Amino acid sequence: MYGAGVRVRRWWYEHGGGHVRSLGRTVVSIGNLTVGGTGKTPLVIALGEALSARGVGVAVLSRGYGGQLERVGGMVSDGSGRPAVAWTEAGDEPALIARRLPHAVVIVGRNRVAAWSRFGRLVPREVCLLDDGFQHLAVARDADLLLIDATEPFVGAALLPRGRLREPLSVLSRASAVVITRADQASPDAVDMIERYLASRHPSIPVFYARFVASSLLPVGGGAAVPVDRLKRIRVLAVAGIGRFESFRALVDREGATIVETIQFRDHHPYRAVDLDRIRTRARASGADLVVTTEKDAIKMETLVQAGEPLWAVRIDARVEAAATWNAWIDRIVRAVA
Protein backbone atom coordinates (compact mmCIF):
# COMPACT_ATOMS: atom_id res chain seq x y z
CA MET A 1 0.00 0.00 0.00
CA TYR A 2 2.86 2.38 0.80
CA GLY A 3 4.56 1.58 -2.50
CA ALA A 4 1.36 2.16 -4.43
CA GLY A 5 0.93 5.52 -2.74
CA VAL A 6 4.50 6.55 -3.62
CA ARG A 7 4.02 5.57 -7.28
CA VAL A 8 0.69 7.39 -7.59
CA ARG A 9 2.21 10.52 -6.03
CA ARG A 10 5.16 10.45 -8.43
CA TRP A 11 2.86 9.88 -11.43
CA TRP A 12 0.67 12.77 -10.27
CA TYR A 13 3.59 15.20 -10.28
CA GLU A 14 5.09 13.88 -13.50
CA HIS A 15 1.81 14.34 -15.38
CA GLY A 16 0.96 17.81 -14.14
CA GLY A 17 -1.53 17.00 -11.41
CA GLY A 18 0.72 18.21 -8.63
CA HIS A 19 1.97 21.79 -8.92
CA VAL A 20 5.77 22.02 -9.18
CA ARG A 21 6.82 25.53 -8.18
CA SER A 22 9.95 27.36 -9.25
CA LEU A 23 11.78 29.26 -6.52
CA GLY A 24 13.23 31.73 -9.01
CA ARG A 25 16.75 30.58 -8.13
CA THR A 26 19.09 27.78 -9.08
CA VAL A 27 18.02 24.92 -6.78
CA VAL A 28 20.21 21.99 -5.76
CA SER A 29 18.50 19.25 -3.75
CA ILE A 30 20.45 17.10 -1.29
CA GLY A 31 18.56 13.98 -0.26
CA ASN A 32 18.49 10.23 0.08
CA LEU A 33 16.37 7.14 -0.51
CA THR A 34 16.42 5.69 2.99
CA VAL A 35 15.27 6.83 6.42
CA GLY A 36 17.97 7.62 8.94
CA GLY A 37 21.20 9.57 8.73
CA THR A 38 23.21 9.33 5.52
CA GLY A 39 25.18 12.52 6.15
CA LYS A 40 22.96 15.12 4.47
CA THR A 41 23.75 17.94 6.90
CA PRO A 42 27.58 17.73 6.50
CA LEU A 43 27.08 17.61 2.71
CA VAL A 44 24.81 20.67 2.76
CA ILE A 45 27.48 22.50 4.76
CA ALA A 46 30.30 21.33 2.48
CA LEU A 47 28.42 22.35 -0.67
CA GLY A 48 27.44 25.69 0.89
CA GLU A 49 31.07 26.39 1.81
CA ALA A 50 32.26 25.47 -1.70
CA LEU A 51 29.71 27.76 -3.38
CA SER A 52 30.44 30.62 -0.97
CA ALA A 53 34.16 30.27 -1.69
CA ARG A 54 33.33 30.78 -5.37
CA GLY A 55 31.47 34.00 -4.58
CA VAL A 56 27.98 32.53 -4.92
CA GLY A 57 25.31 33.56 -2.41
CA VAL A 58 23.67 30.57 -0.72
CA ALA A 59 20.25 30.03 0.81
CA VAL A 60 19.25 26.79 2.54
CA LEU A 61 15.62 25.67 2.60
CA SER A 62 14.90 22.96 5.16
CA ARG A 63 11.89 21.46 6.87
CA GLY A 64 13.07 22.42 10.35
CA TYR A 65 12.09 19.10 11.88
CA GLY A 66 11.16 19.41 15.56
CA GLY A 67 11.39 23.21 15.66
CA GLN A 68 8.57 25.58 16.52
CA LEU A 69 8.84 27.19 13.07
CA GLU A 70 8.32 23.89 11.24
CA ARG A 71 4.56 24.31 11.05
CA VAL A 72 4.35 28.06 10.31
CA GLY A 73 7.65 28.62 8.49
CA GLY A 74 10.30 31.17 9.34
CA MET A 75 13.75 32.59 8.75
CA VAL A 76 16.43 31.03 10.92
CA SER A 77 19.27 33.24 9.70
CA ASP A 78 19.35 36.22 7.35
CA GLY A 79 22.96 35.63 6.30
CA SER A 80 24.32 38.69 8.09
CA GLY A 81 26.43 36.60 10.45
CA ARG A 82 24.29 37.56 13.43
CA PRO A 83 23.15 34.79 15.79
CA ALA A 84 20.32 32.67 14.44
CA VAL A 85 17.11 31.99 16.32
CA ALA A 86 17.24 29.35 19.04
CA TRP A 87 17.37 25.70 18.05
CA THR A 88 13.96 25.19 19.68
CA GLU A 89 12.51 27.42 16.96
CA ALA A 90 14.73 26.39 14.07
CA GLY A 91 15.19 22.66 14.68
CA ASP A 92 18.61 21.27 15.52
CA GLU A 93 19.92 20.65 11.98
CA PRO A 94 18.95 24.08 10.51
CA ALA A 95 20.44 25.71 13.63
CA LEU A 96 23.71 23.88 12.99
CA ILE A 97 23.68 24.78 9.28
CA ALA A 98 23.10 28.45 10.16
CA ARG A 99 26.05 28.37 12.55
CA ARG A 100 28.40 26.67 10.12
CA LEU A 101 27.28 28.85 7.17
CA PRO A 102 27.00 32.29 8.81
CA HIS A 103 26.60 34.14 5.48
CA ALA A 104 23.88 31.84 4.16
CA VAL A 105 20.19 32.54 4.51
CA VAL A 106 18.46 29.63 6.25
CA ILE A 107 14.68 29.23 5.93
CA VAL A 108 12.53 26.47 7.41
CA GLY A 109 8.99 25.24 7.00
CA ARG A 110 7.09 22.03 6.44
CA ASN A 111 5.49 23.72 3.41
CA ARG A 112 8.71 24.82 1.77
CA VAL A 113 7.10 26.57 -1.15
CA ALA A 114 5.08 28.74 1.23
CA ALA A 115 8.11 29.42 3.44
CA TRP A 116 10.17 30.46 0.41
CA SER A 117 7.36 32.67 -0.89
CA ARG A 118 7.31 34.55 2.43
CA PHE A 119 11.03 34.88 3.03
CA GLY A 120 13.18 33.60 0.17
CA ARG A 121 12.23 36.21 -2.39
CA LEU A 122 13.44 38.92 -0.02
CA VAL A 123 17.07 37.78 -0.05
CA PRO A 124 19.53 38.13 -2.96
CA ARG A 125 21.00 34.63 -2.94
CA GLU A 126 21.78 32.90 -6.23
CA VAL A 127 21.59 29.24 -5.17
CA CYS A 128 19.06 27.51 -2.91
CA LEU A 129 20.15 24.24 -1.31
CA LEU A 130 17.06 22.13 -0.70
CA ASP A 131 17.89 20.12 2.41
CA ASP A 132 16.43 16.59 2.38
CA GLY A 133 14.64 17.44 -0.82
CA PHE A 134 14.74 14.33 -3.01
CA GLN A 135 11.13 13.42 -2.16
CA HIS A 136 9.94 17.07 -2.04
CA LEU A 137 8.54 17.04 -5.56
CA ALA A 138 6.61 20.32 -5.21
CA VAL A 139 9.84 22.31 -5.65
CA ALA A 140 11.51 22.47 -9.08
CA ARG A 141 15.23 21.81 -8.94
CA ASP A 142 18.18 22.13 -11.29
CA ALA A 143 20.19 19.28 -9.75
CA ASP A 144 19.45 16.36 -7.44
CA LEU A 145 22.36 15.16 -5.30
CA LEU A 146 21.43 11.74 -3.92
CA LEU A 147 23.29 10.24 -0.95
CA ILE A 148 23.70 6.49 -0.45
CA ASP A 149 25.18 5.19 2.81
CA ALA A 150 27.62 2.38 2.02
CA THR A 151 27.12 0.89 5.49
CA GLU A 152 23.39 0.47 4.77
CA PRO A 153 23.22 -1.36 1.42
CA PHE A 154 19.98 -0.52 -0.35
CA VAL A 155 19.93 -3.24 -2.99
CA GLY A 156 17.33 -5.78 -1.93
CA ALA A 157 15.94 -3.47 0.75
CA ALA A 158 12.19 -3.11 1.23
CA LEU A 159 10.00 -0.04 1.19
CA LEU A 160 8.61 1.46 4.37
CA PRO A 161 7.17 0.33 6.70
CA ARG A 162 8.75 -3.09 6.23
CA GLY A 163 12.17 -1.73 5.28
CA ARG A 164 14.09 1.55 5.15
CA LEU A 165 13.43 2.72 1.58
CA ARG A 166 11.38 5.88 1.11
CA GLU A 167 10.95 5.20 -2.62
CA PRO A 168 11.62 2.28 -5.00
CA LEU A 169 15.08 2.06 -6.56
CA SER A 170 13.72 3.01 -9.97
CA VAL A 171 13.72 6.68 -8.87
CA LEU A 172 17.52 6.69 -9.00
CA SER A 173 17.02 7.92 -12.57
CA ARG A 174 16.03 11.31 -11.10
CA ALA A 175 19.48 11.81 -9.56
CA SER A 176 21.91 14.24 -11.19
CA ALA A 177 24.78 12.76 -9.16
CA VAL A 178 25.23 10.16 -6.43
CA VAL A 179 27.43 10.50 -3.36
CA ILE A 180 28.34 7.22 -1.65
CA THR A 181 28.90 8.14 1.98
CA ARG A 182 30.87 6.25 4.64
CA ALA A 183 32.58 4.12 2.00
CA ASP A 184 35.63 4.08 4.30
CA GLN A 185 33.55 2.42 7.04
CA ALA A 186 31.87 -0.17 4.84
CA SER A 187 33.18 -3.46 3.56
CA PRO A 188 34.69 -3.46 0.05
CA ASP A 189 31.97 -5.90 -1.02
CA ALA A 190 29.22 -3.47 0.05
CA VAL A 191 30.79 -0.59 -1.87
CA ASP A 192 31.36 -2.82 -4.90
CA MET A 193 27.70 -3.89 -4.88
CA ILE A 194 26.54 -0.26 -4.97
CA GLU A 195 29.00 0.59 -7.74
CA ARG A 196 27.97 -2.38 -9.86
CA TYR A 197 24.27 -1.60 -9.41
CA LEU A 198 24.74 2.03 -10.46
CA ALA A 199 26.97 1.10 -13.39
CA SER A 200 24.48 -1.46 -14.72
CA ARG A 201 21.27 0.58 -14.24
CA HIS A 202 22.37 4.22 -14.37
CA PRO A 203 25.82 4.40 -16.01
CA SER A 204 25.57 8.09 -16.92
CA ILE A 205 25.12 9.36 -13.34
CA PRO A 206 28.35 10.78 -11.84
CA VAL A 207 29.40 9.02 -8.62
CA PHE A 208 31.37 10.61 -5.78
CA TYR A 209 32.55 9.32 -2.42
CA ALA A 210 32.30 11.17 0.88
CA ARG A 211 33.89 10.38 4.20
CA PHE A 212 33.25 12.20 7.44
CA VAL A 213 36.27 13.38 9.38
CA ALA A 214 36.75 15.00 12.76
CA SER A 215 38.37 18.39 12.16
CA SER A 216 38.46 19.90 15.68
CA LEU A 217 37.03 19.81 19.19
CA LEU A 218 34.79 22.58 20.49
CA PRO A 219 33.93 23.14 24.16
CA VAL A 220 30.17 22.92 24.58
CA GLY A 221 28.94 26.26 25.83
CA GLY A 222 31.58 28.35 24.06
CA GLY A 223 35.32 28.73 23.85
CA ALA A 224 38.24 28.16 21.53
CA ALA A 225 38.51 25.05 19.39
CA VAL A 226 41.40 22.65 19.96
CA PRO A 227 42.97 20.07 17.62
CA VAL A 228 41.13 16.79 17.44
CA ASP A 229 44.29 14.88 18.40
CA ARG A 230 43.44 15.93 21.97
CA LEU A 231 41.39 12.72 21.97
CA LYS A 232 44.37 10.40 21.57
CA ARG A 233 44.63 7.94 24.45
CA ILE A 234 41.93 9.84 26.37
CA ARG A 235 39.16 7.93 28.16
CA VAL A 236 35.86 9.27 26.83
CA LEU A 237 32.13 8.89 27.27
CA ALA A 238 30.53 9.18 23.80
CA VAL A 239 27.03 10.71 23.80
CA ALA A 240 24.80 11.46 20.82
CA GLY A 241 21.23 11.57 19.59
CA ILE A 242 21.68 11.15 15.83
CA GLY A 243 20.50 8.81 13.09
CA ARG A 244 23.69 6.75 12.95
CA PHE A 245 25.23 6.56 16.41
CA GLU A 246 27.57 3.74 15.43
CA SER A 247 29.14 5.99 12.79
CA PHE A 248 29.90 8.65 15.41
CA ARG A 249 31.37 6.05 17.73
CA ALA A 250 33.60 4.72 14.94
CA LEU A 251 34.79 8.25 14.15
CA VAL A 252 35.76 8.92 17.79
CA ASP A 253 37.50 5.54 17.95
CA ARG A 254 39.50 6.35 14.78
CA GLU A 255 40.84 9.47 16.47
CA GLY A 256 42.57 7.31 19.09
CA ALA A 257 40.19 7.81 22.01
CA THR A 258 39.43 5.01 24.44
CA ILE A 259 35.63 4.80 24.61
CA VAL A 260 34.82 3.59 28.11
CA GLU A 261 31.05 4.16 27.93
CA THR A 262 28.34 5.32 25.52
CA ILE A 263 24.90 6.88 25.87
CA GLN A 264 22.67 6.80 22.82
CA PHE A 265 19.60 9.02 22.60
CA ARG A 266 17.03 8.97 19.80
CA ASP A 267 17.62 11.22 16.82
CA HIS A 268 16.74 14.91 17.43
CA HIS A 269 16.56 14.31 21.19
CA PRO A 270 15.73 17.57 23.07
CA TYR A 271 18.17 17.57 25.98
CA ARG A 272 16.97 18.53 29.45
CA ALA A 273 18.76 19.09 32.74
CA VAL A 274 17.99 15.52 33.80
CA ASP A 275 19.84 14.24 30.72
CA LEU A 276 22.96 16.23 31.61
CA ASP A 277 22.79 14.89 35.17
CA ARG A 278 22.64 11.37 33.79
CA ILE A 279 25.64 12.07 31.53
CA ARG A 280 27.69 13.47 34.43
CA THR A 281 26.83 10.48 36.61
CA ARG A 282 27.83 7.97 33.91
CA ALA A 283 31.05 9.89 33.18
CA ARG A 284 32.12 9.74 36.84
CA ALA A 285 31.16 6.08 37.20
CA SER A 286 33.06 5.05 34.06
CA GLY A 287 36.16 7.08 34.88
CA ALA A 288 35.92 9.10 31.65
CA ASP A 289 38.26 12.08 31.27
CA LEU A 290 36.03 13.78 28.71
CA VAL A 291 32.48 13.59 27.41
CA VAL A 292 32.30 13.93 23.62
CA THR A 293 29.24 14.56 21.50
CA THR A 294 28.32 15.95 18.06
CA GLU A 295 27.82 19.61 17.15
CA LYS A 296 24.16 18.87 16.49
CA ASP A 297 23.77 17.60 20.06
CA ALA A 298 25.96 20.35 21.51
CA ILE A 299 23.62 23.07 20.25
CA LYS A 300 20.90 21.61 22.47
CA MET A 301 23.19 21.26 25.51
CA GLU A 302 24.78 24.72 25.55
CA THR A 303 22.44 26.32 28.07
CA LEU A 304 22.64 23.30 30.37
CA VAL A 305 26.40 22.94 30.85
CA GLN A 306 28.44 24.37 33.69
CA ALA A 307 31.54 26.54 33.22
CA GLY A 308 34.66 24.47 32.68
CA GLU A 309 32.75 21.23 32.33
CA PRO A 310 34.72 18.60 30.32
CA LEU A 311 32.07 18.29 27.62
CA TRP A 312 33.32 18.68 24.04
CA ALA A 313 31.74 18.55 20.60
CA VAL A 314 33.48 16.92 17.66
CA ARG A 315 33.26 19.06 14.55
CA ILE A 316 32.56 16.74 11.63
CA ASP A 317 33.35 17.75 8.05
CA ALA A 318 32.49 15.99 4.81
CA ARG A 319 35.41 15.27 2.48
CA VAL A 320 34.27 14.46 -1.05
CA GLU A 321 36.69 12.36 -3.04
CA ALA A 322 37.28 12.39 -6.74
CA ALA A 323 37.92 16.03 -5.82
CA ALA A 324 38.65 17.27 -9.34
CA THR A 325 35.40 15.85 -10.70
CA TRP A 326 33.47 17.09 -7.67
CA ASN A 327 34.83 20.62 -8.13
CA ALA A 328 33.97 20.48 -11.83
CA TRP A 329 30.39 19.48 -10.90
CA ILE A 330 30.15 22.48 -8.54
CA ASP A 331 31.61 24.76 -11.21
CA ARG A 332 28.81 23.74 -13.56
CA ILE A 333 26.32 24.96 -10.95
CA VAL A 334 28.18 28.25 -10.73
CA ARG A 335 28.10 28.62 -14.52
CA ALA A 336 24.38 27.89 -14.51
CA VAL A 337 23.90 30.70 -11.99
CA ALA A 338 25.91 33.08 -14.15
Image: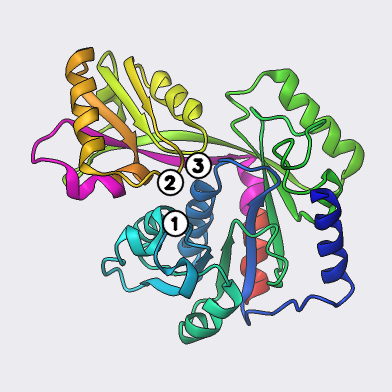
Q: Nearer the viewer, residue 126 or 218?
A: 218
- Residue drawn at x 54%, y 55% as measured from the top left: 47
Is residue 187 visible to us here? yes
Q: Is residue 77 left or right of residue 306?
A: right
**Magenta range:** 299-327
Of callouts 2 and 1, which one flags the residue occurring earlier in the amino acid sequence? 1
Residue type indicated by callout 2: His
Residue 218 belongs to the span the image colors magenta = no
The answer to whether mark 2 and mark 1 are in CB contact below 8 A is yes
Residue type indicated by callout 3: Ala
Say what secondary structure mark 2 lies in: loop
Q: Nearer the viewer, mark 1 or mark 3?
A: 1
Q: Nearer the viewer, residue 10 or 308?
A: 10
- Residue drawn at x 47%, y 53% as measured from the top left: 45
Say what secondary structure mark 1 lies in: loop
x%, y% of residue 157? 78, 33
Of callouts 2 and 3, which one flags the residue occurring earlier in the amino acid sequence? 2
Residue 326 belongs to the span the image colors magenta = yes
Residue type indicated by callout 1: Gly
Circle 1 crowding by C-alpha within 10 Å: few under 14, some 14–19, many from 20: some
Where does label 2 land, which residue? 268
Is residue 172 visible to us here? no
Q: Is residue 126 left or right of residue 96?
A: right
